[in-house]
């Protein structure tokens, strides 16, 4: 723990030293070039780096140019002033990130100490160093920087990912605490401080009247969203408690803003000139600021949702649009001096549902990741800068009386306020807030950077006691964030506050919850009262009939939320199973993936995993897999997936097409080929289905799930047979352009599709059949069926038309990783070669023709090749024995010659084939498979010699 | 809501009802007003058509089932005590109420609430939610939003998730274990205020 802190400090010191060194070094060359910039004041200019960014570019642009004209040509030029601002910003971000990383090295340390505390400490140290080095505080938390850049990132994140249902369920309590509670705190603190001042506890040097104290009370009384998020996210109290404290911290912004402005104007005109009308103006102003802010937010939410309806062809813009419009909501509210936080919160809250439905999966991931990153870094910077700002003694003046009184009053009034309001609320709440909740809520009333920024914004000329107020604010912030932040966790543990369960609802819960909602609404109707459920029901009706229709694109409007939720859970389970390393797949535990994953994968809720779950290109239908009885087949399924996931990448990686606007590969040729293959397969599939009388269910999902065709089992459990022909490929060419777009869109999002087929092989056949089973489907969107007689030997069919890379079981040896690179290259070259027709396709015209026809015909060829003598796809032979085929394409052999020697040396004797009954560690096994370069399937390896 | 001229004294068996359901006198009076308001023809009992006449209820996708739950035992009429008893399921669980170990579980206890909802699913009253029954509920709740295949997949998934004894149906025990997602939220309603 200590070591970690030490490391952290050392590192940060190093960073700062480097920073300073750069600055120091930058000074000497400058006088010779542009004397105007050499004055240290320019550097020592206090205030944040960002604040200067506005004026920086203009002078530096010409400065950078002038020396070049003057003193001849210099090879290396020192352009510090040119890069200074962004450089310093970047360095700060780096410091913040590194600090975060180092902090999270120690698991034990992080569970004890909240991050915000450590960051403030770090800020103190950094500030001390800067102050010591330059005798002047260069950096401090600049209100402009804070309100325009740092705060919006945090609030935006908070608003956008606010659990809307929970928020509105508790809206009454939240509003009560936010409005009444904040007013209560502000007035009581202000008046009491004034009273204490009159009583003489506060020193006479603090020149402040009633208005000054009320102003101070207003800015110090608001619970701070940044601090609350930072502390409460680590404490993990239950959702209800969190949403109440957190919602309060967001919604009290309007109160704070209005009180602050009203008092400032009162202070300006002087307390004597305040008329009664002004108080009413204050009330009106509160309504305008809060409702106006909310309205602005909702308007922007509508705009954002509406705009994202039409981004289908420019997916790449989606995340930016989200950021822009949410930020614009904030700025617009600031523009009209409305409550910006309210505006942003409601913008995020309002648009989330529609935007999430409209934008693509990848955009969702991007939005989520970026927002979290920005918020996290902004939070880090805020706390560091809070620490730094506190070091500068010139900014504040200490008065023990004021500080101690403020601390006491804040704490006492918060507790009284919470108790009183909860008492009233509990008369109406169904789930009452008990004593423990109240304690946590009072104790969780953290003050933070908003208060600090507001107090720094005060005009020292108007508010004489500004310096004292700054000191008091700093102490309050530090005390609440550090002391209360540090102790709230033990307190919560000690009080046994119910923690949040770190789990997502199961499908059952999703369904039942909706059923409950309906039932409750119905019962309210029957009992004849228009309660909360009644209105919620009405709202949902309105939303479904009008809002969603207007704001969601047609393709998603019809979709059910429940279905989406179910999909998400499916995908989550899939991811978690994969994350567990695939071991589960081979064990019987898999039979209930949801249970397993939820039990052993509790961190699903954290961002990274959630991102992964949303961002994964792997979609597989676990339902299909987990009803799979044979463990062997499961293992092979897994093998197959890993191979498919790893081996077809080259095809994508070497796309010749580059576009800034589309991430899809619009490769006309390949699409045609795939369409053709799909056609063939669907025909064969229908043929097969008549042959094998199997219970088949096509699931025409919007997302294409991993397809899984299985043979009907003896126990006759209906199996899902979901797959590639679910999109009616035969009509593809006739589809409108619109629909084609949809297709490519889906294909883009869902990368890998594969088929797992239960083989009916016997152990004796294992060596050959397994090797064949490992064949990889290279086509990204078309999963190959293999319905014919060849199925027995070749359970998984590759898209032969696109050259299936074949990996043999025999080749399960460790191979240098760079070989894979070569392998990838060779595939890509092969790919390019394979698409042009006959002339370049070597020998066996029949086979090559077959292979070009696509997967469905493959089984015939394979069936003939079952004896080992028949023709096999030449393409796979080509990379196995390039040396023996010099007459073949030179391009091909060029690549392959690099690979070939290694490959031949690596090809293991066939005795290394797996022993049928024995189970290996699948993970190791798979890994070796993945890194294995192409090698022969057994029948094929014999092919060339025969030819 | 309705006329407020009823008094407790006019309501038959009010005392027993209060004892049984835990409603306060004000609640009972209110419910009685509502009951009379629903009973448009003044026939002294409610029938399914009376419920069907509630405008808001018509929007509710599973209103049929909920109405059906009021007329549980195949009767076509519902008198006031039954009306109150069924609504009493939705009273919040009160912790302060003295718990008499001898008395049967209160009508608004957690498991009784769940049982009530379970019955909404379990139409054939065999104590199990079969796949078919679940499908029906899903179909009504989701209306036209999803395809049949999607419905089936959701249903399969749901059963598979909840089904502990692998009989391809959800028993009440399994149902109870699987609906405990957020205790503070899952079941709450104030029948009256």
Image: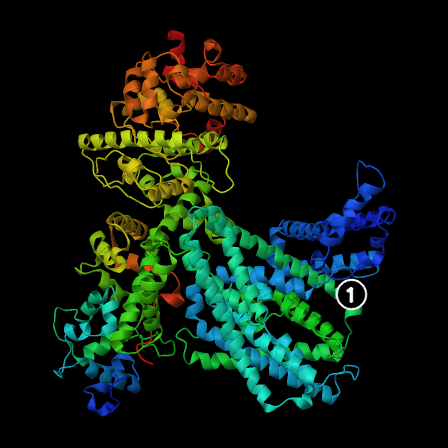
Q: Is residue A117 left or right of residue A576?
A: right
Q: Is residue A118 visible?
A: no
Of all residues, the one furthest to the front in this rendering is: A69
Residue shown at 20% from the left, 88% from the top: B11
Residue shown at 54% from the left, 55% from the top: A371
| Above or below, comparing residue A871 to residue B31 in the picture | above
Q: Nearer the viewer, residue A785 or A672?
A: A672
Q: Is residue A70 visible?
A: yes
Q: Is residue B24 left or right of residue A882?
A: left
| Above or below, comparing residue A121 to residue A314 in the picture | below
Of all residues, the one furthest to the top in this rendering is: A946
Q: Nearer the viewer, residue B68 or B164?
A: B68
Q: Where is mark 1, residue-wise?
A: A392
* Subunit that carries the residue with mark 1: A
Q: Is residue A654 left or right of residue A408?
A: left
Quadrant of the frame with the C terminus of chain A:
top left
Residue shown at 66% from the left, 71% from the top: A454
Q: Position of residue A63 (x, y in %)?
A: 78, 49
Local SS, label 1: loop
């Amino acid at each position: 723990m200590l070591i970690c802190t030490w490391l952290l400090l050392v590192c940060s010191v190093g960073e700062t030293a480097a920073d300073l060194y750069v600055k120091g070094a930058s000074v000497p060359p400058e006088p010779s070039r542009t004397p105007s910039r050499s004055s240290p004041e320019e550097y020592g200019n206090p205030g944040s780096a960002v604040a200067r960014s506005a004026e920086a570019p203009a002078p530096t642009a010409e400065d950078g140019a002038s020396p070049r004209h003057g003193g001849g040509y210099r090879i290396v030029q020192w352009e510090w002033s040119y890069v200074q601002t962004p450089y310093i910003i970047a360095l700060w971000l780096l410091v913040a990130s590194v600090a975060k990383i180092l902090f999270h090295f120690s698991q034990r340390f992080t569970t004890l100490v909240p991050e915000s505390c450590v960051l403030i400490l770090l800020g103190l140290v950094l500030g001390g160093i800067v102050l010591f080095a330059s005798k002047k505080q260069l950096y401090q938390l600049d209100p402009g920087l804070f309100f325009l850049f740092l705060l919006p990132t945090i609030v935006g994140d908070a608003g956008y990912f606010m659990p809307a249902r929970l928020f509105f369920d508790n809206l009454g309590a939240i509003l009560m605490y936010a409005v009444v509670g904040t007013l209560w705190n502000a007035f009581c603190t202000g008046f009491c401080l004034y009273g204490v001042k009159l009583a003489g506890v506060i020193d006479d040097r603090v020149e402040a009247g009633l208005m000054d104290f009320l102003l101070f009370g207003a800015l110090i009384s608001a619970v701070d969203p940044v601090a609350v998020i930072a502390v409460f996210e680590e404490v993990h109290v239950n959702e209800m408690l969190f949403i109440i404290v957190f919602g309060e911290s967001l919604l009290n912004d309007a109160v704070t803003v209005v009180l602050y402005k009203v008092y400032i104007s009162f202070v300006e005109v002087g307390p004597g000139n305040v008329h009664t009308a002004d108080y009413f103006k204050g009330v009106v102003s509160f309504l305008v600021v809060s409702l106006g802010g909310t309205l602005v937010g909702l308007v922007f939410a509508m705009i954002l949702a509406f705009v994202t309806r039409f981004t289908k062809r420019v997916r790449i813009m989606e995340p930016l649009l989200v950021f822009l419009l949410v930020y614009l909501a904030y700025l617009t509210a600031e523009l009209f001096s409305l409550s910006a936080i309210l505006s942003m919160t409601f913008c995020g809250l309002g648009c989330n549902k529609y935007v999430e439905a409209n934008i693509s999966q990848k955009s969702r991931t991007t939005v989520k990741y970026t927002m979290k990153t920005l918020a996290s870094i902004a939070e880090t910077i805020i706390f560091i800068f809070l620490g730094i700002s506190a070091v500068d003694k010139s900014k504040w003046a200490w008065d023990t009386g004021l500080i101690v009184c403020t601390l006491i009053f804040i704490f006492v009034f918060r507790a009284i306020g919470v108790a009183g309001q909860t008492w009233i609320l509990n008369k109406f709440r169904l789930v009452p807030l008990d004593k423990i909740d109240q304690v946590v809520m009072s104790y969780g009333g953290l003050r933070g950077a908003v208060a600090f920024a507001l107090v720094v914004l005060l005009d020292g000329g108007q508010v004489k006691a500004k310096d004292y107020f700054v000191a008091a604010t700093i102490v309050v912030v530090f005390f609440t964030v550090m002391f209360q932040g540090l102790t709230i966790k033990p307190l919560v543990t000690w009080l046994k506050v119910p923690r949040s369960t770190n789990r997502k609802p199961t499908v059952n819960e999703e369904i039942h919850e909706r059923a409950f909602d309906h039932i409750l609404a119905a019962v309210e109707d029957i009992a004849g009262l228009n309660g909360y459920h009644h209105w919620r029901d009405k709202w949902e009706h309105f939303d479904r009939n009008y809002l969603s229709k207007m704001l969601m694109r047609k393709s998603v409007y019809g979709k059910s939320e429940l279905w989406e939720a179910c999909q998400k859970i499916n995908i989550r389970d899939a991811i978690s199973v994969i994350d567990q390393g695939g071991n589960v797949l081979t064990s019987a535990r898999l039979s209930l993936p949801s249970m397993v994953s939820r039990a052993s994968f509790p961190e699903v809720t954290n961002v990274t995993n959630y991102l992964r779950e949303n961002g994964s290109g792997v979609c597989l239908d676990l339902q299909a897999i987990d009803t799979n009885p044979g463990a062997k087949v499961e293992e092979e399924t897994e093998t197959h997936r890993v191979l498919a996931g790893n081996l077809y990448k080259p095809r994508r990686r070497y796309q010749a097409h580059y576009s800034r606007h589309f991430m899809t590969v619009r490769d006309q040729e390949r699409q045609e080929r795939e369409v053709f293959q799909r056609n063939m397969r669907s025909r064969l599939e229908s043929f097969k289905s008549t042959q094998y009388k199997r219970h088949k269910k096509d699931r025409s999902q919007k997302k294409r799930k991993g397809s899984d065709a299985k043979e009907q089992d003896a126990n006759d459990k209906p199996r899902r047979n979901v797959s590639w022909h679910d999109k009616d490929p035969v009509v593809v060419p006739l589809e409108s352009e619109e629909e084609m777009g949809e297709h490519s869109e889906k294909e883009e999002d869902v990368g890998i599709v594969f088929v797992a087929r239960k083989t009916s092989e016997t152990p004796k056949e294992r060596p050959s059949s397994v090797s064949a089973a490992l064949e990889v489907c290279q086509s990204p969107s078309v999963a190959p069926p293999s319905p014919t007689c060849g199925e027995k030997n070749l359970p998984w069919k590759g898209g032969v038309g696109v050259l299936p890379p074949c990996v043999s079981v025999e080749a399960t040896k460790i191979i240098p990783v760079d070989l894979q690179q070569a392998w990838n290259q060779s595939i890509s070259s092969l790919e390019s070669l394979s698409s042009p027709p006959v002339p370049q396709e070597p020998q066996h015209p029949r086979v090559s023709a077959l292979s070009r026809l696509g997967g469905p015909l493959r089984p015939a060829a394979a069936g003939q090749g079952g004896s080992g003598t028949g023709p096999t796809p030449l393409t796979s032979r080509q990379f196995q024995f390039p040396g023996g085929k010099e007459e073949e394409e030179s391009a091909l052999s060029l690549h392959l010659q690099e690979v070939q020697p290694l490959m031949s040396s690596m090809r293991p004797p066939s005795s290394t084939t797996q022993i049928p009954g024995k189970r290996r560690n699948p993970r190791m096994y798979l890994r070796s498979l993945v890194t294995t370069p192409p090698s022969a399937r057994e029948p094929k390896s014999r092919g060339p010699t025969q030819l | 809501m309705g006329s407020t001229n009823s008094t407790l004294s006019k309501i038959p068996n009010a005392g027993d009802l209060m004892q049984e359901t835990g409603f306060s006198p004000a609640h009972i009076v209110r419910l009685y007003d509502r009951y009379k308001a629903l009973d448009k023809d003044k026939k002294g009992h409610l029938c399914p058509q009376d419920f069907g006449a509630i405008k808001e209820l018509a929007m509710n996708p599973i209103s049929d089932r909920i109405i059906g739950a009021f007329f549980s035992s195949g009767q076509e009429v519902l008198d006031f005590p039954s009306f109150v008893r069924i609504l009493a399921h939705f009273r919040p669980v009160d912790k302060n109420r003295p718990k008499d170990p001898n008395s049967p579980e209160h009508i608004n206890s957690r498991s009784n609430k769940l049982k009530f909802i379970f019955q909404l699913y379990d139409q054939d009253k065999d104590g199990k939610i079969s796949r078919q029954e679940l499908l029906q509920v899903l179909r009504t709740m989701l209306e036209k939003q999803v395809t049949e295949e999607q419905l089936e997949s959701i249903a399969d998934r749901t059963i598979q998730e909840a089904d502990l004894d692998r009989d391809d149906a959800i028993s009440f025990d399994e149902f109870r274990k699987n609906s405990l997602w957020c205790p503070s939220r899952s079941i709450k309603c104030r029948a009256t205020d």
